[in-house]
Image: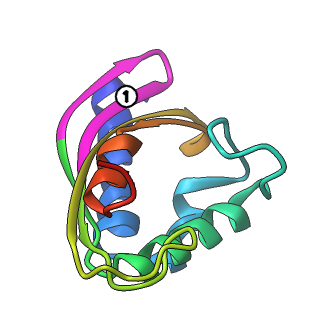
Amino acid sequence: MSSDEYKALVLRYLDQIQTKHNLDVLDQFLSAGITDHTAPPGAPKGIDASRQFFKALFRAFPDMRPVVHDQAVEGNKVWTYKTMKGTHLGEYMGIAPTGKTIEYAVIDIVRIQAGRITDHWAVGDRLSLMKQLGLVS
């Protein structure tokens, strides 16, 4: 795959999964044994874990959407800098709904092999998210 094809695959993934919340097509983008390198210790692994993560996220933030600012490619890895925006209308990590609109920056790195995402790393501005939810000042 070319660099442009890698970027396009990630943009299609973001559109289908994170914008349209279409989890029925998750297996078209992720390998069955995907490794999320930023998941907490002991967290479930694989595509089903990814599906459960997104279900919980979209229950908490039903209008959650990414805004992509930039992408870069090195070999078979794609970096995507984006802002996630949504309204906190459901429980999130034990936090009762606040009704607040939140926005926080994320850098995702994914490895792609045979047209599927096999590995994922993420760095998100969790402090900003916690401030917006009123957990810290």
Residue sitting at 79 percent across and 43 percent down?
41
Residue closest to the far top: 74
Span highlighted in magenta in the image: 69-83
> Horizontally, is 100 left or right of 76 in the view?
left
What main secondary structure does the magenta stretch of the protein show? Answer: strand
Measuring from the top left, give residue 50's x and y in whole percent: 62, 61
Q: How is the image coloured?
A: rainbow
What x and y, as percent, mark residue 34?
70, 47
Please say if 16 is above or below 29. below
- In the picture, measured across the screen, residue 137 lies left or right of residue 21, that is left
Q: Nearer the viewer, residue 17 or 116?
A: 17
Say left or right for 50 vs 108: right
Residue at x-position 70% and y-position 63%: 49
> Is residue 79 found inside the magenta-colored segment of the image?
yes
- Give me the residue at 47% from left, 71% from top: 57
Crowdedness of circle 1 by 10 Å Cα count: few (<14), some, many (20+)?
some
Q: Which residue is mark 1?
A: 79
Residue 39 placed where, x, y %? 66, 45
Viewer-closest of 25 and 91: 91
